[in-house]
Image: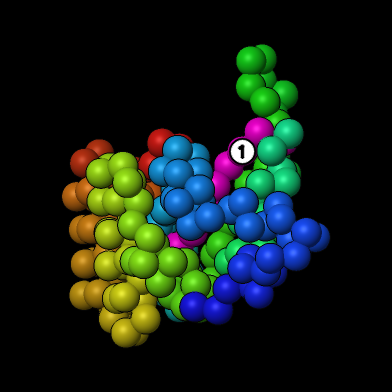
Amino acid sequence: MKIDKSYNSSSADNQQERLLSANYIVGIVDGEGYFSVSPRIRKVKNKEVIEIDCVFGIDLNEKDKEILERIRRVFICGRLYYRKDARTNFCNLWSYRVRTHKDLIERILPFFTKHPLQLPSKRISYNHFQRVLKLVESGQHRTMEGFMQIKRIVKRNRILRDYTPSSSKEDEDIVHAL
């Protein structure tokens, strides 16, 4: 994985970026990050299309946007999104999300393989996320067998998302709690 050169630079201008060590990023992700998978089948022009939506994200209070910008500079991928929340006792958020399979496979997975998450529950979530992405990378998700394998991973571990419509109560959507 390529890391932005400014991440390791010793110039005074880059002092803030240097403060974001791998351990700091791991700690932020352990506390505020998530790994999400949404397998679904859509109809497009009378044809069924298998989609596996994978997302790595971090949500922080709007006052902490700068941290997300700095994390984005370390990974050199992803986007920031603003989410206004009108509910009482809730704050507005900035979200950092990486959604493309290429960036997840080439940048996010190598980082967390080299710098493992510390919370066992988050590490388990990451391991299943990595497993799904490996199936996607190999193209197995394009077959009904591969799709069903991903659905089983999602359902069994109850740490990812499954938005595939289902007729049975047992297969209802599983939503990861942030």
Name the kind of residue labelled 1 in the image.
Leu
Q: Nearer the viewer, residue 170 or 39?
A: 39
Q: Position of residue 121 (x, y in %)?
A: 28, 42
Q: Position of residue 14 (x, y in %)?
A: 74, 61
* Residue at x-position 37% and y-position 81%: 137
Classify residue 146 by image quadrant: bottom left
Residue 29 visible within the image: no
Residue bearing mark 1: 60
Range covered by the magenta-colored residues: 54-62
Residue 48 relative to residue 16: left or right: left
Residue found at the far right of this picture: 13
* Residue at x-position 66% and y-position 33%: 61
Q: Position of residue 65 (x, y in %)?
A: 71, 43
| 142 to 38, vertically: above or below | below
Residue 7 relative to residue 46: left or right: right
Q: Position of residue 71 (x, y in %)?
A: 61, 56
Predominant secondary structure, magenta span: strand
Residue 157 visible within the image: yes
Q: Nearer the viewer, residue 118 or 164?
A: 118
| 109 to 161, vertically: above or below | below
* Residue at x-position 40% and y-position 72%: 110
